[in-house]
Amino acid sequence: MQHIRQGQGPPPTRAGGTHTSHGDQHARRRFARHFLEMVAAMVVGMLVLGAATQGILALAGVEFSASRHPELASLEMAFDMSAGMAVWMRLRGHGWASTLEMCGAMFAPMLLLFPLLWLDVVAPGSVVALEHVAMLPLMFLVMLRRRDEYGC
């Protein structure tokens, strides 16, 4: 876009009419790398906070499983993953608005999954897995909404 602001007109295109510059490729790689970094931060949050939560609950004599208490397991998982991702995003310099949007993507699948669970359309043991499947495309959509911030 800078070339347009400077009055140089659009960049030349290749034979097929498309333009792929080194900068575009770099931006896409940054975008993909950032997505993978956030997934890794979510996994770390899930493992570290999940283990801590399970340990504290075990010491308190409280146990809940994904099949017996799918709502609690799902909420705990989303919280653990959001915490890890939020820490990473803040360390990378993202603002609170984009960080909270991304955390919202962790909890949004529950808006559909919980009613389906209560209507016996979704099995209790599959809620957490379906939550994970829905989170990744939602994260991608949130990132597309703020392309400039995420590198694309």
Image (spheres, rainbow, N blue to C red):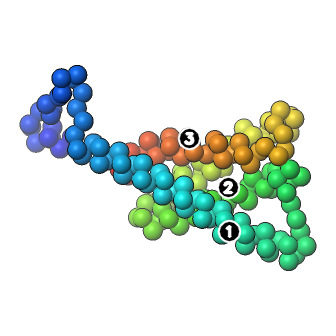
Instruction: Compute the Cα span from label 1 to label 3.
Output: 23 Å
Residue under numbered circle 1: 49
The amino acid sitting under disc 1 is Leu
Asked if marks 2 and 1 touch (Cβ < 8 Å), the reply is no
Q: What is the number of the mark on residue 78?
A: 2
Instruction: Pinpoint residue 12: horizontal percent, then vertical percent.
Output: 13, 31
The first of marks 2 and 1 along the sequence is 1
Instruction: Compute the Cα span from label 3 to label 2.
Output: 15 Å
The amino acid sitting under disc 2 is Ala
Q: Secondary structure at mark 1?
A: helix
Instruction: Pinpoint residue 65: horizontal percent, then vertical percent.
Output: 85, 57
Q: Residue at x 72, y 38 (%)?
A: 112
Name the quadrant of the N terminus.
top left
Instruction: Pinpoint residue 122: horizontal percent, then vertical percent.
Output: 81, 37
Q: What is the number of the mark on residue 88?
A: none
Is residue 65 shown left or right of residue 8? Answer: right
Name the quadrant of the C terminus.
top left
Check disc 2: other Cα within 10 Å, few if <14, some if 14-19, many if 20+.
many
Residue occupying the far front of the picture: 15
Check disc 1: other Cα within 10 Å, few if <14, some if 14-19, many if 20+.
some
Residue occupying the far bottom of the picture: 59
Residue under numbered circle 3: 137
The amino acid sitting under disc 3 is Pro
Above/below status of 84 relative to 119:
below
Is residue 76 shown left or right of residue 17? Answer: right
Instruction: Compute the Cα span from label 2 to label 1.
Output: 11 Å
Q: Residue at x 54, y 46 (%)?
A: 139
